[in-house]
């Protein structure tokens, strides 16, 4: 059954994932767009904390976790997102539905393998500066869509019963389309500039996880993973068209190298296995080089990225047969994220809270997960935009045994 689900989902995702507009943030104008959370809904519902070596839930942030899988896992997730964008003078609302991830994990003795597809970043904005009422003034409209996705393949290995190591390779690819329209009041014809950028490149990630018993019930969990810096190749084609002219002027493609900085994530937690967990996670990343000629600005610069998170889960009674609600996993988390983007000398930061629940499918190790995320990003200071967001996420995690030799003909 799980094999049929995977085939159907892959066919669907191949059409949907690259056509979606995964953000409505004006801040996606800069760099490669809004960088998405790389992880499952289970981890996202805990603020991004992912320190436990789990045998039935995938942790795609740290490849060493794959060595703990005991069944084949297929997981897929998506989000319905709402946001209110506001400045000191106005506000607007936006909605969108997004694909979040698709991944398959396979246990192979002391090894574990995983592969899948994850959106890396999303671009989706429309910015209008209307000055048509003033003679000689310029009115502008900027639009952008697209983003990057990544396919990955990783291996984990269990060195000791409580210590794993792992690595994965990721190939990033995608297209960003932007357009700008300039109209001068009193002048008959305006101009439109379109840019299509094809972006691609690979990067590597290594990780390790360790846990140990503190007493009969309590365990200590630790996680460490490092993503190496890498280069993305951006090939952009630009065309400029004056209103009334049927033939736009197209320029030769320009090639630009963008740099994804190195990143380190550390996590530690304490808890009772299959009962409760409280953990924290810290992520740090260097300042990247994301400038393309179509999204540069004198008032914009990049700084080091950082994320701080705390979260955990609670299961009332994992082995209960009489009370279904006792087997539900309840999750919560807090996060504070410095995006690395600085506009008008204001750092664009993100403060959010997550709540979630995992509902087991009776008679199996599969589960359905639901999550809510709310918070704010940006600020209304210095003529900027503050985003107040509310996201509803849903994921499915199917568990099954593959490659088991039949005992009967």
Image: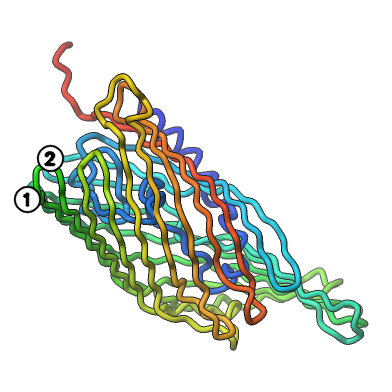
Decide if residue 321 is on the left or right side of residue 178: left
Q: Nearer the viewer, mark 2 or mark 1?
A: 1
Q: Secondary structure at mark 1?
A: strand
Image quadrant containing the C terminus: top left
Place of residue 388 in the rendered image (x, y in percent of width and height, measured from the top left): 60, 61
For the residues labelled 2 and 1, the Cα–Cα distance comes to 13 Å
Marking on residue 127: none
Secondary structure beneath dot 2 equals loop
Q: Residues within 10 Å of mark 2 (few under 14, many from 20)?
A: few
Tell me if 120 is positioned left or right of 263 in this view: right
| Residue at (59, 88) in percent of width and height | 298
144, 379: nearer the viewer: 379
Residue at the far top: name it: 409
- Residues tagged 2 and 1 counted as in contact (Cβ below 8 A): no
- Whether 23 is drawn above or below 275: the answer is below
Residue 267 higher or lower than 369, as above or below: below
Which of the 4 quarters of the picture holds residue 288? Answer: bottom left
Report x, y in % for residue 344. 59, 84
Position of residue 375 relative to residue 320, above or below, is: below
Identify the residue under disc 2.
109
**Which mark, by number, is residue 160?**
1
Q: Position of residue 402 (x, y in %)?
A: 24, 30
Residue 14 seen by the camera: yes
Q: Quadrant of the N terminus?
A: top left
């Amino acid at each position: 059954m799980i094999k049929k689900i995977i085939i159907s989902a892959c066919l669907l995702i191949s059409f949907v994932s690259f056509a979606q507009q995964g953000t409505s943030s004006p801040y996606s104008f800069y760099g490669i767009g809004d960088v998405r959370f790389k992880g499952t809904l289970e981890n996202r519902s805990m603020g991004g904390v992912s320190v436990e070596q789990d045998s039935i839930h995938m942790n795609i942030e740290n490849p060493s976790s794959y060595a703990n899988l005991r069944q084949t896992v297929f997981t897929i997730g998506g989000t319905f997102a709402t946001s209110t964008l506001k400045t000191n003078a106005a506000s607007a609302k936006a909605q969108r539905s997004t694909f979040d991830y698709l991944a398959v994990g396979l246990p192979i003795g002391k090894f574990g393998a995983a592969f899948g597809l994850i959106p890396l970043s999303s671009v989706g904005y429309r910015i209008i500066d209307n000055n048509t009422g003033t003679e000689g003034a310029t009115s502008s409209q900027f639009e952008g869509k697209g983003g990057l996705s990544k396919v990955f393949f990783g291996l984990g290995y269990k060195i000791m019963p409580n210590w794993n190591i792992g690595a994965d390779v990721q190939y990033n690819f995608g297209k960003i389309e932007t357009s700008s329209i300039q109209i001068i009041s009193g002048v008959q014809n305006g101009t439109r500039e379109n840019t299509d950028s094809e972006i691609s490149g690979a990067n590597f990630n290594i990780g390790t996880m360790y846990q140990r018993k503190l007493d009969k019930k309590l365990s200590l969990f630790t996680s460490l993973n490092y993503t190496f810096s890498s280069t993305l190749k951006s090939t952009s084609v630009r065309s400029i068209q004056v209103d009334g002219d049927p033939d736009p002027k197209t320029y030769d493609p320009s090639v630009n190298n963008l740099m994804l900085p190195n990143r380190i994530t550390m996590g530690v937690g304490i808890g009772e296995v299959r009962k409760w967990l409280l953990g924290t996670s810290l992520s740090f990343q260097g300042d990247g080089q994301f400038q393309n000629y179509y999204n540069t600005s004198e008032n914009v610069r990049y700084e080091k990225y950082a994320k701080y998170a705390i979260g955990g889960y609670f299961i009332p009674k994992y082995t209960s047969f009489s009370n279904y609600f006792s087997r539900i996993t309840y999750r919560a988390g807090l996060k504070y994220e410095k995006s690395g983007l600085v506009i008008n000398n204001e750092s664009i930061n993100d403060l959010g809270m997550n709540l979630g629940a995992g509902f087991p499918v009776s008679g199996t190790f599969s589960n359905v997960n639901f999550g809510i995320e709310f918070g704010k990003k940006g600020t209304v200071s210095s003529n900027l935009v503050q985003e107040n967001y509310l996201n509803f996420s849903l994921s499915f995690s199917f568990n099954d045994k593959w490659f088991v030799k039949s005992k009967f003909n």
